[in-house]
Image (cartoon, rainbow, N blue to C red):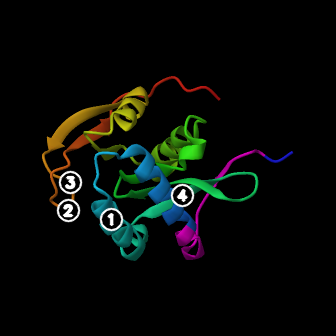
Amino acid sequence: MPAPFSIGTPSVRDYPELLRVWEASVRATHAFLPTEYIDELRVLMQERYLDVVMLICVRDQHKRIVGFAGVAAGRVEMLFIDPLFLGQGLGKRLLWYAVEHLNAEALDVNEQNAQAIGFYFSQGFEVVGRSAFDGMGQPFPLLHLRLTARPARSA
């Protein structure tokens, strides 16, 4: 019997599905962002951001993408899980794939996203800095995190 979830590399043809996951995830977990800003970010994701990272994705048994991450220069630049699949360990699988195979050891997270901060702390990341503005210069503070410990992981 095939594993229920598998990690692989998406292609450009998968971008619409990645954008679907991204938007569903952001709307479910980033209540602090105005709708207009999410719409602006969606355009940037589609036209720019997906092309500048090494993408990995997790697919369900039907080959549908249910989460993805993007890594560049040793940093997890994005990690999003379809809200219907939260709490199933998929974020952890993507994160540790990025750490172990793509040498990622740093990332930024929105300071207002307490759920994501808790997740990264539980995975051994610690705050090493803070910016008052996000990467687009908007007043959504970012915490800069670095992997400082490797927690015991279950198989």
Query: What residue appears at the point 75 percent right and 52 percent down from the top-left corner?
Result: 61
Residue 149 x/y as whole percent: 38, 27
- Determine the secondary structure under disc 2: loop
Residue 128 x/y as whole percent: 21, 36
Disc 4 marks a residue whose amino acid type is: Ile
The first of marks 3 and 1 along the sequence is: 1
Q: Residue furthest top?
A: 152
The first of marks 4 and 1 along the sequence is: 1
Part of the protein shown in magenta: 3-16
Query: What residue appears at the point 87 percent right and 45 percent down from the top-left corner?
Result: 1
Q: Are marks 2 and 1 in contact (CB under 8 Å)?
A: yes
The answer to whether residue 79 shows anywhere in this view is no
Disc 1 marks a residue whose amino acid type is: Leu
Which of 53 and 135 lies nearest the eye of the viewer?
135
Residue 92 x/y as whole percent: 52, 38
- Up-down relation of residue 93 to residue 119 (above or below): below
Compute the Cα span from label 2 to label 3: 5 Å
- Determine the secondary structure under disc 4: strand
Disc 2 marks a residue whose amino acid type is: Met
| 118 relative to 1 in the view: left or right | left
Q: Which mark is residue 113?
A: none
Q: Which picture quadrant has residue 143? A: top left
Asked whether residue 11 is drawn in magenta, I would say: yes
Q: Nearer the viewer, mark 4 or mark 1?
A: 1
Q: Which residue is mark 3?
A: 134
Q: Which mark is residue 41?
A: 1
Q: Nearer the viewer, mark 2 or mark 1?
A: 1
Compute the Cα span from label 3 to label 4: 24 Å
- Determine the secondary structure under disc 1: helix
Disc 3 marks a residue whose amino acid type is: Asp
